[in-house]
Amino acid sequence: MVSAPEEVLRGRLLLNLGDAQARRLGIRVRSKENPKELYFAHTLNNTVVAPPRMLIAFLENNLREDGSVAIPKPLQPYMGGMTELRKNKVISVF
């Protein structure tokens, strides 16, 4: 039996989604033959990001010994200027 983390990391089947995903995301490419012509790219599933793999790589590369996670400078504007992630202490009211 495969444990949950191993199952998450296991490779997935790639599916050709044609231009459906590109239409939703507005991904267009220029024709080599006619540079003025734009068309929707054909994509594979998870073209933009494979979330489990991205998260694992992010944590592996930015996890600190104290358990905090450094946020790389290019991502900081998308995180409201935060430079790190820390676990908050939760105080029980019960």
Image (spheres, rainbow, N blue to C red):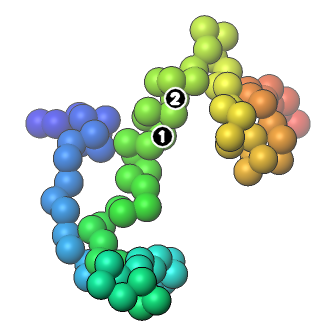
* Quadrant including the C terminus: top right
Residue 46 lies left or right of residue 89; in this view the side is left
Q: Position of residue 76 (x, y in %)?
A: 75, 41
The residue labelled by disc 1 is: 55
Residue at the top extreme of this rendering: 65
Q: Is residue 70 above or below residue 14?
A: above
The residue positioned 67% from the left and 21% from the top of the image is 68
- Tell me if I can see residue 40 in this picture: no
The residue positioned 66% from the left and 10% from the top of the image is 66
The residue labelled by disc 2 is: 59
Name the disc covering residue 85, or none: none
The residue positioned 35% from the left and 62% from the top of the image is 46
Q: Position of residue 54 (x, y in %)?
A: 44, 43
Corner quadrant of residue 15: bottom left
Q: Is residue 8 above or below residue 24?
A: above
* Quadrant including the N terminus: top left
Real-space Cα separation, disc 2 to disc 1, in angstroms: 6 Å
Q: Is residue 16 above or below residue 86?
A: below
The residue positioned 78% from the left and 47% from the top of the image is 77
Q: Are marks 2 and 1 in contact (CB under 8 Å)?
A: yes
Residue at the left extreme of this rendering: 1
Label 1 packing within 10 angstroms: few (<14), some (14-19), many (20+)? few
Residue 55 lies left or right of residue 8; in this view the side is right
Helix, strand, or loop for circle 1?
helix
Q: Amino acid at mark 1?
A: Leu
Q: Amino acid at mark 2?
A: Leu
In the image shown, does 50 or 6 lie closer to the viewer? 50
